[in-house]
Each structure stands twice: as structure tokens, then as C-alpha cells.
Amino acid sequence: MQEEKLIILITAIGGGGHGEQILKALKLANNPNYRIIGADANPNCLQFELVDDHSVLPIASDPSYLNKLIELIKRFKVKVLFHGCEPELKIFSEYRDQIEKLGVFLPINPKEVIDLCMDKEKTNQKLIELGFKSPRYQVVSQKSDIDLIDWFPVVVKPSIGGGGSANVYIAQSHNELHALADYIGLENNSIKFVIQEYVGTPEEEYTVGVLHDMNGEYINSIAINRLLSGQLNIRMSVSNNTPRSELGKKLVISSGVSHGYIGRYNQVTEQCKEIAKAIGTKGAINIQCRLVDGVVKVFEINPRFSGTTSLRAMVGYNEPDILIRRHLLGEVITKDFEYEEALILRGLTETKLDIPKE
């Protein structure tokens, strides 16, 4: 008798975000009993070509989003639900009980972890409280707050959200900070900004995955030593005009598109494991950091699957597949299982689609 298909819904699979990454990872799992449904707000979503069936969902801020999502779950008899963007993660977290009552496996972190990590001010504060070496920071809401900063260079970023390094800037002096405050309309902007110490060098930047099961049991960890070269991988690059030569000749902010050398990097992952455990992770978490004098300094934590999920799956570290196998298929997953080490690079590809005639 043919085994019944496991229906998996992945939302926001377009746009190059982590929804597409989860889709690619599950395709790499090559499980014939997975039936993958893809959803996106864009009716011309390229990734619809990669799934078994698809549907258009409104954007997460649409008042009808939750009802449309539930309709989709019921129509396809969905058993596993993955979010593909952070606005949807917030909704899934808020309405978790309602979604899970439909018999859906929802592999997201506890609400308190999600709320903590999506606020950079609270994340910095919590890491310091827990004894970890977080970069210095200052939340600013008016120009006079800038005068409190006496450690340059700094990174200016939104305190809430800002995935993919959106609205992130470098400042190397008070003059640059004041000019930047005028540029972003600091005192008239509804967005709260945090000023964070720029630390380390681009050569020692890592994106680190630490995976726990949904009961909080540690499974494994992995790191990518990011290669920051070219427009695809760099958000901003400026000459270092400060006296701090230890930071290198260039000050670099990475983009949301990561690639590089993938491996265990014990010196980095061991410290990140402690961080993930301390904040109560249950599920996948992604830590953005630099290694400075042997110490991991975290500048951001994403409480979700990473934008490098498919790269990790390519070396045998397939997080969405692991959680399905662990919780729904009853498999025993070996702690710290082996995976390959590799250099994985990304580029752009083009796809030609036939336009249906009216």
C-alpha cells in the first residue's frame, strides 16, 4: 500500500527570502512522501514552478490573511506549516494555538524567544544580562542622544525588524551621525533606531545555525564563514577613516545574501550553542556574529530558519527536514551528526516562462 503523502505548506516562497530556502531544502530531502504546497502574495511567483501545488495568499498585513491561510490549510489538509517571511512569523506566533488546533505541525520558536530576538535593543540587553559579549549599543530617538556615543565606528539600524540589512548604515564620527540623523528623519520617524558598536573584520563574520527540537533538546550546530565580496553579498562598504586599524581597511555591512565556507567552526558554534540554550530556543535559530579575539560578538539573532537554509542542506544539514523526521516521522536524530564541509557560492540565474494567452 502506498504511504499517504505528508502535506507541507510553505508561505512567502518568492522574493529570495527564507521561504524559498525552506522550499529548496525540502526539495533536496528528496522524500517521495512529501507533497509541497507553495504560497506567495505575488501571482507571478517564479517558485510556483517548483512545488506540487500553489496558491496566492495576501500579504501578512492584510486583514484577511489569517482566514485565507486557514482556508488553505483546510483545503489541502496541511500537516506541516513553514513561514517564509518575518511578518508571517509574527502572525503564526500570535495565533499559534489556533493554527495547531487544526492538526498542523508548526516548527517555530516560543513567542518569548521570537519577541526577544526581533527587537535588537532587547536582544543586546538580554545577551549582556546573560554574561555574553555583546557590542555596545545605544537606542536613539532624538539627535541629542547621539552625543552619548563616544565609540566609533558604529552601525545604525532599526531596532525592530530590518531583515536583510535594510536601512542599515555606518557612521565614523559625530558629524556623520548627525548628518545621518537628518537623512533618516530621526526625530520625525516612527522607526526606533539602535546605534551599535562596529566590531571585528569582514573576514571573521559568521552566520551560525543552532538547531533544537520543539522540546528544547539540542540537535546540532553549523556555521558559514561569510565571503563578503561583490554587490550580491555586501550592503555597504566604506574606507575605514577611524584610528582603529584593527578593524581593517574597509568597514563592511553584509547583505541578506550569504555564502562562503561551511563547517562546524567549533570556536564559534560552541559559544553560539550556549547563547541559543540560554535564551530558550525551541526550533531553528540563526545567529549573526563576528569573532573578535576568540570571542563571539553577536549583532543580530534571527529566531527562525536562515537565508542559508538550502546551503546547509547541501552539505547534509537539512533543518526543516530534520524537524519533520524528528517529530512527525518518529526518527531518532543523532546529536551533532556529521555533515560535509564545503565552499558554496551564490549567483544570479535567469528563467524564461511562457506567458499564457488571454
Image (cartoon, rainbow, N blue to C red):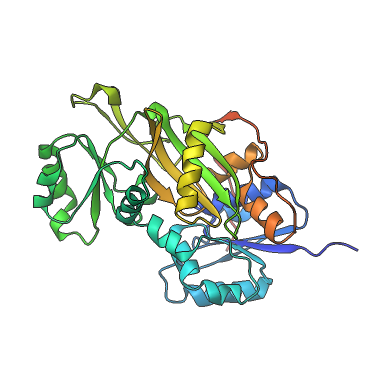
Tell me which corner region of the image, top left, top right, bottom left or bottom right, holds residue 90: bottom left
**Which residue lies at the image location 87% right of the left edge and 62% below the top edge?**
2
Residue 240 placement: quadrant: top left
User: 54 left or right of 180?
Assistant: right
Which of the two residues, 37 or 219, is positioned nearer the viewer here?
219
On the image, the x and y values in percent for residue 349 come to 54, 38
Q: Is residue 237 above or below residue 141?
A: above
> In the rendered view, does 225 fall on the left or right side of 290?
right
Residue 234 in percent (x, y) is at: 37, 35
346 lies above or below 29: above
Q: Position of residue 247 (x, y in %)?
A: 29, 26
Instruction: Work out whether residue 230 or residue 356 is closer to the camera in this orientation and state it.
Output: 230
Judge whether residue 229 can be spotted in this image: no
Query: In the figure, residue 230 lies in which quadrant?
Result: top left
Closest to the observer, 140 or 11: 140
Q: Residue at x 48, y 45 (%)?
A: 274
Percent coordinates x, y for residue 298 in the rendering: 38, 42
316 on left or right of 270: right
Q: Quadrant of the C terminus?
A: bottom right
User: Residue shown at 70%/64% (left/top)?
Assistant: 7
